[in-house]
Amino acid sequence: MKRIAVLTSGGDAPGMNVAIRAVVRTGLDKGWEVFGVRYGYTGLITDNMVPLGARDVGGIIHQGGTMLQSSRCPEFTTEEGRLKALRVLNQRDIDALVVIGGNGSQAGAHALSQMDYPVIGIASTIDNDLYGSEISIGVDTALNIALEAIDRLKVTASSHQRAFLVEVMGRDCGYIALMAGIAGGAETVLIPEVETDPETVAEELRHAYLRGKTHALVVVAEGARYNASHLARFFEEHYERLGFEMRVTVLGHTQRGGTPSAFDRLLATRLGATATDRLAKGKHGILMGLVKGEIVSTPLAEVVAKKKQLDPYLMSLAKVLAK
Ligand code: F6P
């Protein structure tokens, strides 16, 4: 092993920079050359990469986003696109690739490793929907941003006796909504994993009003069957059934833009460092993730084939705690 490349792909996540730094500095420490691929898989196809030295990754540990830029690259999902990327990697004599990203990115990593190219993945997505890591880079920061917004909204909600509908990200996964709902004291949480209809939400809010609550909070995952705009339309028509006046806040990309938390920085550092350690031992075709406090590797084939499940206990606890 002499030369490796690293890229960030898909939605950016706070802590990606920290993982890049760890890969670069631990790679250099092993005597390797490290290249940073710009714009994710797009940069691999178009041969857009730069050598990275220790100083190039200085001063980024506290910055969200990714210094390498990211993209979603439909061309890489095709055999032709991957062949172009492979040609670039071979022409540059790059021996292995580190892919920092979520589900789509790791599916790309798996496809490349099936073409016999050494790839190692690092779990990074705010959605926390990646099999092989109980928590991925960016989740803690995104959750804390959602929570801070929720805390603030509760203050104004109480002053006006209002209900707030807060939509959080997560694509098809309800993790951020469920955790933000539990930690933020939500009356109701709507997630894609559990079927709920607007009628039931209205009933829950009405009961909260009758129990004397000064405000009510509904956290809804963007991927839930009834998202914020859908529910808002319903509640406009059925306002009298709620008791509370309703306001809607969609947090959207604010959750992705934060300064990485201490947890995310430490996780990203450990995952990045272990990725180069595994490569040095000749291991690849795996994803580095956190399971039971330990950094472990899971075959990429398993990562792409299996679906991560939400904890059913926490789903039922969210209901009990809303009393
Ligand atoms: O996967 C991360 C994520 O932020 C999802 O939660 C969200 O659905 C999606 O990316 C948004 O994608 P984009 O940044 O392309 O709008």
Image (cartoon, grey):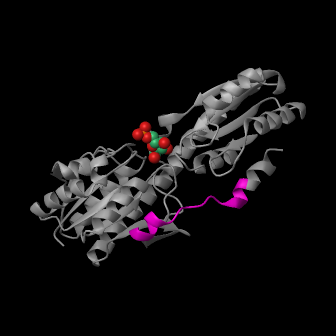
Q: Residue at x 24, y 72 (%)?
A: 116
Q: Residue at x 44, y 63 (%)?
A: 304
Across and down, in percent, residue 1 comes to: 19, 73
Q: Nearer the viewer, residue 20 or 115?
A: 115
- The kind of secondary structure the magenta stretch mainly shows is helix
Looking at the rendering, the stretch of residues picked out in magenta corresponds to 300-315
Which quadrant would the C terminus be assigned to in this image? top right
Is 238 left or right of 267, judged from the image as shown?
right
Q: Residue furthest front?
A: 79
Q: Residue at x 37, y 51 (%)?
A: 16
Is 26 left or right of 259, judged from the image as shown?
left
Asked whether residue 314 is drawn in magenta, I would say yes
Task: Classify residue 31 by image quadrant.
Answer: bottom left
Quadrant in which ligand 1 is drawn: top left
Is 101 left or right of 240, judged from the image as shown?
left
- Res 55 seen here: no
